[in-house]
C-alpha cells in the first residue's frame, strides 16, 4: 500500500487538473508510459492491472465483437475495478493502418464502446468509464504485417485516478 | 475580358489590362489544349525570361519567369523549351515578337513579360501570351501589381491566366493547401497543422504538435479551417481563423466525439461525424453554434460527409450494407441512395467543385486507390494504386486531385501526391518532412 499512497500523492501534486484528462496509469495506451504504476507484485496497483489482469483485448479486422478470450480478460478487469473503486478508466479504441482515417476513428469508437458495455454488464458504474477512439493514430506495433495489425486492433482500459466528469 | 474581370476582384494583387481590346470578341485562336481522356502530347511553350525594367527588379524577373514555367510544366499539359535552346532573347517587352525565332525552336506558345520594382518595394508585372504559329497575341496583355513579398503569388496568377487562355478552364496555381505535418516514429507520430502554397512554398505552421490533429478542411473563402484535435484528450472539431491563427472548439454535446468536419458551400454550416455510445452518425450545425441536427440514424458507421457544390446534397460513406460504401442523401437528411457497387470498400468521398464527379478512396485486394465516379456511381475510374493511398482533395478547378500516400513498413511515412483526373501526371509534392491529409483551398482572391 505504500506504493499506492505515493501514487496518490503524486497525482494530487499534479493537481488532477483536467476534467477530461485525469492522471493516467498508462502502459501502451495512447498517452505513453509513465512511472506511477506501482509494483506488479501489488494486486491493487495499476501495474498489476496492466500486466497480470491484462489491460487490453484484440479484435478481428473491421470487427468490434468481444470474443470469448477477450470476455475472460474483461471479466477480470471488472472484478479488479470492483475491488479498487478509487479508479476510473478511459477505454481507448484503436484500429490497424489498413483503413481510411475517418472510418478507423468510428471503428475505434465502436470497439471502445463494446468494452465499456461489457464492463457495465459486469457491474461497473458507467460514471467510472469513458471511451475515446484513436483510430489508426497510435499503433503499438509498427510493421506492415498481420502480426502487427492484430496487436493494433485493440481496446485498452487505461486506469485513471480521479473523476471523469 | 472575362479573365480580366475575374482577376480584378483581387484585393492585394491588382490586375489591369495593358491595352484596350481591339474587339469585344476574345481571341482564342487555334492554340488550345482540350483536356480529354486520350493521351496528349504536352504543348511546347517558351517563357522568355521576364525583362527587368530596373535593377531592383532583376531577381524577381528571373524568379517569376521560373515559377510561371514550373506551374505550367507541373500540369503535365505543357512542356517547357529550355532557354538555352532559344534563338533569341526578349530584351524589350514592347518590341514586336519575331515569330520565326520561336517557330524555329517549335514553341507553340510564348510568354513574355516585364517586371519593375517601385521605390516602396511594390512590383509591377506585365505579360503577354502569344500563339506562335498563328503569329498572334492570345488575349490581352495584362498588368499585375503587388508587394515584393507576394512575387510568387504574382507568378502563379500569370500562370493561371496562361493556363486558362490555352485550356479554356479555370486555373489553380494561386491557391494554398492545408495539411498535417508529421514527425517522429510511427508509434509516436507528432502532428501539426501547416499551410503552404499549392506547390509547397511558403510553409506556415498553424498549431504545435502537443495534440494529435487530423484532416483539416478549408472554408469556401479560404479564410477558415475546420479540423479535428485531441487537445482535450478526445477528438473534437476545431475552427481556426487563418489570418489570426485563433482557434475555438465547436460546441458539441458532452460525452460525444466529433470528427470528419466539412463546410457547406456557403460557409455557414458544418457537417461532421458525431460518435455517441459507439455509434457514429452524420450531423450538421451552424458554424456559430446551435444544436447539432442529426442527418443519419442507423446503427452503422456513417462518416466522411461532403456537400455538393450547390449545397443541396451530401455524399458520405456508410457500412450499413456490411462494408464501406458511398451514399448520397438530401442536405437536410432523409433517404440515402447507394452509388458505389464495385468490388471492395469505398470511403472518403469528396464532391468535385464542378459538381460532376465524386473522388473517393477504394480498398480492394489489399491495395488502396484514389478514384473518381460520376455522381450516379457510373464511370468509376481508379487513378492510383499503392500500399496506402487515401483522402482525395480537389484542386479549385476540379482537374487535379491531391491525396496522401503512405509507404509500407516500420519506417513507412506519408507524403502528398497529385494526380490529374485522367489518371496522368502522378507527382509527389515536396514537403519539409512527412505530410498527410491535404486539403486544397479555393483559388485565392
Image (cartoon, coloured by chain):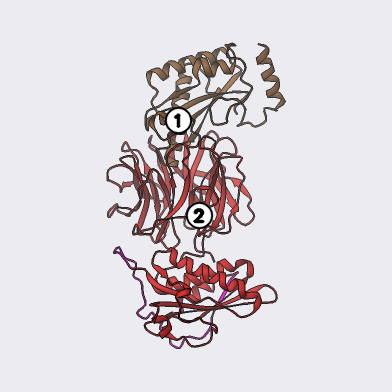
Chain colours: A brown, B red
Is residue A145 visible in the rendered image? The answer is: yes
| Residue A128 percent location from the top left of the image | 56, 22
Vertical arrangement, residue B306 with respect to residue B147, above or below: above
Q: Which corner quadrant holds the C terminus of chain A? A: top right
| Residue B198 percent location from the top left of the image | 50, 59
What label sits on residue B430 in the rendered view? 2
Q: Residues within 10 Å of mark 1 (few under 14, many from 20)?
A: many
- Name the foreground residue: B166 vs B273: B166
Question: Badge 2 sits on which subunit?
Answer: B
Vertical arrangement, residue A105 with respect to residue A8, above or below: below
| Residue A12 percent location from the top left of the image | 70, 24
Tell me the SS state at disc 2.
loop
Q: Is B24 covered by the magenta stretch?
A: yes
| Residue B410 percent location from the top left of the image | 46, 36
Q: Which corner quadrant holds the N terminus of chain A? A: top right
Q: Is B56 covered by the magenta stretch?
A: no
Residue at the disc numbered 1 = A152
- Name the foreground residue: A1 vs B66: B66
In this view, which residue lies farthest toward the right? A13
Q: Residues within 10 Å of mark 2 (few under 14, many from 20)?
A: some
Task: Say left or right for A24 vs A102.
Answer: right
Question: Badge 1 sits on which subunit?
Answer: A
Amino acid at each position: 500500500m505504500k506504493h499506492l499512497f505515493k501514487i496518490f500523492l503524486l497525482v494530487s501534486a499534479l493537481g488532477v487538473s483536467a476534467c477530461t484528462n485525469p492522471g493516467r496509469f498508462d502502459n501502451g495506451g495512447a498517452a505513453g508510459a509513465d512511472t506511477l504504476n506501482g509494483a506488479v507484485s501489488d494486486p491493487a496497483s495499476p501495474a498489476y492491472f496492466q500486466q497480470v489482469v491484462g489491460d487490453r483485448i484484440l479484435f478481428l479486422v473491421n470487427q468490434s465483437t468481444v470474443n470469448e478470450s477477450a470476455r475472460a480478460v474483461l471479466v477480470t478487469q471488472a472484478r479488479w475495478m470492483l475491488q479498487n473503486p478509487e479508479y476510473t478508466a478511459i477505454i481507448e479504441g484503436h484500429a490497424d493502418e489498413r483503413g481510411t482515417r475517418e472510418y478507423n476513428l468510428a471503428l475505434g469508437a465502436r470497439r471502445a464502446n463494446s468494452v465499456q458495455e461489457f464492463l457495465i454488464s459486469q457491474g461497473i458504474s458507467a460514471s467510472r468509464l469513458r471511451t475515446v477512439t484513436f483510430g489508426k493514430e497510435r499503433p503499438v506495433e509498427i510493421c506492415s504485417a498481420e502480426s502487427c495489425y492484430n496487436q493494433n486492433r485493440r481496446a485498452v482500459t487505461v486506469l485513471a485516478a480521479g473523476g471523469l466528469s | 475580358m472575362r479573365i480580366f474581370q475575374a482577376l480584378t476582384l483581387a484585393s492585394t494583387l491588382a490586375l489591369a489590362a495593358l491595352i484596350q481590346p481591339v474587339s469585344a470578341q476574345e481571341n482564342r485562336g487555334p492554340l488550345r489544349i482540350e483536356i480529354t481522356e486520350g493521351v496528349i502530347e504536352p504543348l511546347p511553350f517558351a517563357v522568355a525570361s521576364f525583362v527587368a525594367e530596373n535593377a531592383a527588379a532583376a531577381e524577381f524577373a528571373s524568379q517569376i519567369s521560373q515559377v510561371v514555367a514550373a506551374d505550367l510544366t507541373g500540369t503535365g499539359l505543357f512542356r517547357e523549351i529550355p532557354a538555352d535552346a532559344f534563338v533569341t532573347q526578349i530584351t524589350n517587352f514592347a518590341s514586336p515578337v519575331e515569330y520565326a525565332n520561336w517557330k524555329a525552336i517549335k514553341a507553340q506558345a510564348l510568354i513574355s513579360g516585364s517586371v519593375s520594382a517601385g521605390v516602396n518595394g511594390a512590383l509591377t508585372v506585365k505579360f503577354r501570351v502569344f500563339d506562335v504559329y498563328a503569329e498572334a497575341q492570345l488575349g490581352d496583355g495584362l498588368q499585375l501589381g503587388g508587394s515584393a513579398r507576394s512575387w510568387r503569388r504574382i507568378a502563379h496568377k500569370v500562370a493561371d491566366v496562361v493556363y486558362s487562355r490555352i485550356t479554356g478552364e479555370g486555373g489553380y496555381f494561386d491557391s494554398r493547401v492545408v495539411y498535417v505535418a508529421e514527425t517522429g516514429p510511427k508509434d509516436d507520430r507528432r502532428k501539426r497543422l501547416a499551410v503552404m502554397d499549392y506547390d509547397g512554398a511558403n510553409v506556415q505552421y498553424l498549431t504545435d504538435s502537443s495534440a494529435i490533429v487530423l484532416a483539416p478542411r478549408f472554408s469556401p473563402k479560404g479564410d477558415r479551417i475546420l479540423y479535428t484535435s485531441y487537445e482535450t484528450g478526445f477528438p473534437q472539431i476545431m475552427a481556426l481563423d487563418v489570418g489570426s491563427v485563433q482557434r475555438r472548439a465547436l460546441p458539441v454535446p458532452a460525452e460525444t466525439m466529433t470528427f470528419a468536419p466539412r463546410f457547406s458551400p456557403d460557409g455557414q454550416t458544418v457537417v461532421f461525424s458525431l460518435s455517441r455510445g459507439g455509434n457514429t452518425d452524420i450531423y450538421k450545425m451552424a458554424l456559430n453554434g446551435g444544436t447539432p441536427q442529426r442527418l443519419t440514424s442507423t446503427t452503422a458507421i456513417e462518416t466522411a460527409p461532403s456537400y455538393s457544390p450547390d449545397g443541396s446534397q451530401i455524399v458520405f460513406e456508410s457500412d450499413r450494407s456490411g462494408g464501406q460504401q458511398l451514399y448520397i442523401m438530401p442536405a437536410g437528411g432523409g433517404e440515402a441512395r447507394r452509388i458505389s457497387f464495385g468490388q471492395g470498400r469505398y470511403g472518403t468521398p469528396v464532391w468535385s467543385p464542378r459538381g460532376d464527379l465524386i473522388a473517393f478512396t477504394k480498398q480492394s485486394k489489399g491495395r488502396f486507390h484514389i478514384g473518381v465516379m460520376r455522381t450516379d456511381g457510373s464511370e468509376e475510374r481508379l487513378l492510383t494504386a499503392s500500399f496506402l493511398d487515401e483522402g482525395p482533395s480537389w484542386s479549385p478547378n476540379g482537374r487535379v486531385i491531391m491525396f496522401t500516400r503512405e509507404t509500407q513498413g516500420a519506417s513507412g511515412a506519408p507524403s502528398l501526391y497529385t494526380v490529374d483526373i485522367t489518371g496522368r501526371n502522378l507527382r509527389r509534392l515536396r514537403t519539409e518532412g512527412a505530410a498527410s491529409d491535404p486539403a486544397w483551398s479555393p483559388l485565392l482572391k
